[in-house]
Every structure is written in C-alpha cells, then in structure tokens.
Image: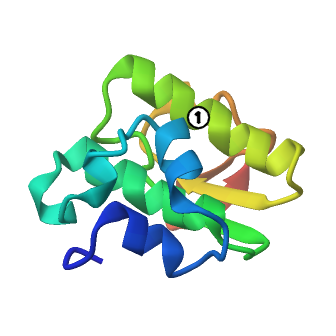
Amino acid sequence: MDYLTPAENVALTSKLPALPVLERLGLTKEESKRNVLKLSGGQQQRVAIARALASAAPVILADEPTGNLDEDTAREITEILRESAHQMGKCVVVVTHSNKLAKQADVVFRLKHGGLQLN
C-alpha cells in the first residue's frame, strides 16, 4: 500500500510489532516511518515481503520476490522465505524467472508449452 509507511503496511496484516519484521528484512527504524513511495524499489519489495511474513495466512504468494534486490539481500530474503516454510509451517509459492532461486526450492514446477511440469 503505497500511501502508508512500512510499519503501517505490516500492521495491516499482523497484531505483532512491525519493526522486528522490517528490521529482519533490512529496513531501519527511520525507514519504517517513511512513506513507501519514498523508498527504493528494493525496499518497497521488502515491505511487501514483511507484510506477507507478518500475516497469519498459511500461504505466501511471492511473485519475483528477489527481482529488485542486490545479490546479498536476495540471498537473505530467500533464506527468510525458506525459514517461513520449514519453521513456521507456511506454504511459500514463488514465481520467478531466476534458475538460481528455483534451485533452492523444495518443489519446482516449470511452465512449458502452456502447461505446468513437475521438475
């Protein structure tokens, strides 16, 4: 939600404090108080991921979750999504063009010739 701050975005989906989740994804306390539109594309992407992680929803749908991130941050986000699946019992569905990211998944489906194929 681009008219809110990162902290307000996370508060939409969780009753837990927003700052720990945002800090885990690399946003500072000061950045968590700015309007989302004043953040970089990568920071905005991390806000969206934080909102999903903080929710009680059992499924996280992530469309290119590392697309706008530098390599180190992308690696951290990937690990956080894996932890969400393995330790928090969430089903994490990632859509990506990145073979590197896909190789880290437990199950991979590929879209080929208009159909899904299990790898």
Question: The N terminus is located in which quarter?
Answer: bottom left
Residue plotted at (85% across, 53% down): 88
Please, what is the three-letter code of the amino acid marked with disc 1? Thr
Q: What residue do we see at 50% from left, 52% from top?
A: 19
Q: What residue is shown at x 37% (from left), y 40% (from top)?
A: 27
Please name whichever residue, 5 or 96, is drawn nearer the observer in this view of the structure: 5
In the drawing, does residue 96 fall left or right of residue 36? Answer: right
- Residue underneath mark 1: 78
- The percent position of residue 58, horizontal first and vertical second, equals 79, 72
Residue 25 spot, x, y in % from top left: 49, 40
SS label for mark 1? helix
- Residue 46 x %, y %: 40, 49
Residue farthest left in this picture: 38
Q: Is residue 62 visible?
A: no
- Bin the neighbour count of mark 1 within 10 Å (Cα to Cα): few under 14, some 14-19, many 20 and up: some
Report the quarter where the C terminus lies. Answer: top right
Rendered location of residue 7, percent (x, y): 41, 64
Residue at 54%, 27% (x, y): give it.
76
In this view, the residue farthest toward the top is: 72
Front residue (pair 47, 118): 47
Compared with 114, 63 (above or below) is above
Front residue of 63 and 97: 63
Q: Is residue 113 above or below residue 105?
A: below
Left or right: where does residue 44 sit relative to residue 54? Answer: left
Q: Nearer the viewer, residue 95 or 71?
A: 71
Q: Is residue 33 above or below residue 42?
A: below
